[in-house]
């Protein structure tokens, strides 16, 4: 049985939550899993600030990026020993952004957005893949850009379904695979994104292409409720709900 799991940023927002997800995933070690992770916590928002500063050339992009670095360094120091390879891998991802800072932005906001913001998913999946391997859940890290092919509509890329389906079946054939949500790649090898909240879409693309038995979108909540408990103290948990009702709730 093949299952596609997707975890959002709130599920892996700190060391404690990452360890919790590690314990959860280990329970499924006997099953074939493809696991999709979003960027950690509010990292997408933090990287959007980097993009804005870089585009405006206001000199604040380095300070904004340092906040992203500090966030991830705190996490990896809480999960790994200093001599482990993950420290270099994370540093190299930040160097990719710093290389962009050396040039004046000339490709347009959407292009710059996709090249920078997408790094959030590479950071999270590198960390999660390394941590899961460390605790005994052996997995293969897959670059989503190698399998999800799109057009050049940056920030809202359209899928080339024939190429994507073929490549997914070629590359995601291991017992346990970990990859990024939200990300694709053009025929010229430029990174694209699939729109905000695109990680759920990634999980669906993978499940469709692999003819998966099940897709599970994991959330750090007890279930679907009739209102947002952050704003309504008397929100009630649904024991079951129809698709039509779920769509209506999601719309509002």
Image (tube, rainbow, N blue to C red):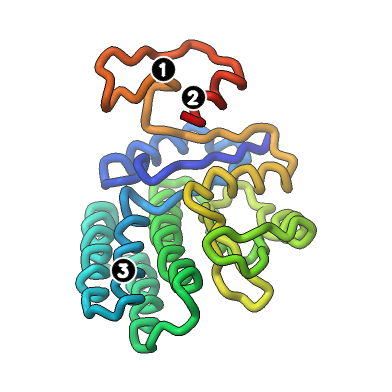
Residue 65 image-quadrant placement: bottom left
Q: Nearer the viewer, residue 54 or 172?
A: 54
Give percent across and percent down for residue 198. Answer: 53, 49
Crowding at dot 1, Cα within 10 Å, few <14 / some 14-19 / many 20+, comes out as few
Give percent across and percent down for residue 221. Answer: 37, 27
Q: Secondary structure at mark 1?
A: loop
Q: Is residue 69 above or below residue 177?
A: below
Going from N to C along the chain, the mark reached first, 1 or 2, is 1
Going from N to C along the chain, the mark reached first, 1 or 3, is 3
Give percent across and percent down for residue 147. Answer: 66, 61
Q: Which mark is residue 226?
A: 1
Gap in angstroms between the C-alphas marked 3 and 2 = 33 Å
Q: Nearer the viewer, residue 152 or 66?
A: 152
Give the residue drawn at x 33%, y 56%: 45
Q: Secondary structure at mark 2?
A: helix
Q: Is residue 101 above or below residue 154?
A: below
Gap in angstroms between the C-alphas marked 1 and 2 = 8 Å
Which residue in the protein does label 2 denote? 249
Residue 129 image-quadrant placement: bottom left
Q: Is residue 120 left or right of residue 34?
A: left
Q: Nearer the viewer, residue 69 or 22?
A: 69
**Dot 1 and dot 3 residues touching (CB under 8 Å):** no
Give the residue drawn at x 54%, y 24%: 248
Q: Secondary structure at mark 3?
A: helix
Q: Is residue 119 left or right of residue 169?
A: left
**Dot 1 and dot 2 residues touching (CB under 8 Å):** yes
Gap in angstroms between the C-alphas marked 1 and 3 = 36 Å
Which residue in the protein does label 3 denote? 50
Q: Which mark is residue 181?
A: none
Whether residue 142 appears in this view of the structure is: no
Give the residue drawn at x 39%, y 36%: 23
């Amino acid at each position: 049985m093949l299952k596609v799991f997707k975890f959002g940023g709130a599920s892996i927002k700190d060391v404690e939550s990452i360890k919790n997800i590690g314990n959860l995933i280990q329970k499924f070690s006997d099953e074939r899993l493809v696991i999709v992770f979003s960027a950690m916590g509010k990292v997408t928002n933090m990287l959007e600030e980097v993009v804005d500063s870089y585009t405006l050339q206001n000199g604040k992009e380095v300070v904004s990026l340092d906040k992203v670095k500090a966030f991830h360094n705190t996490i990896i120091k809480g999960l790994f020993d200093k001599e482990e390879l993950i420290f270099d891998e994370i540093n190299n991802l930040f160097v990719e952004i710093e290389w962009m800072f050396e040039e004046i932005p000339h490709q347009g906001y959407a292009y710059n957005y996709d090249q920078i913001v997408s790094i959030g998913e590479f950071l999270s999946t590198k960390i999660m893949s390394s941590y899961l391997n460390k605790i005994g859940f052996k997995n293969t890290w897959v670059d989503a850009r190698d399998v999800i092919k799109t057009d050049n509509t940056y920030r809202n890329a359209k899928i080339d379904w024939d190429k994507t389906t073929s490549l997914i079946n070629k590359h995601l054939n291991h017992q346990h695979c970990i990859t990024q949500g939200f990300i694709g790649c053009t025929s010229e090898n430029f990174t694209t994104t699939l729109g905000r909240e695109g990680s759920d879409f990634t999980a669906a693309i993978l499940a469709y292409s692999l003819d998966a038995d099940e897709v599970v979108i994991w959330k750090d909540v007890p279930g679907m409720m009739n209102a947002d408990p952050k704003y309504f103290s008397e929100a009630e948990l649904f024991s079951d709900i129809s698709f039509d009702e779920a769509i209506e709730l999601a719309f509002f």
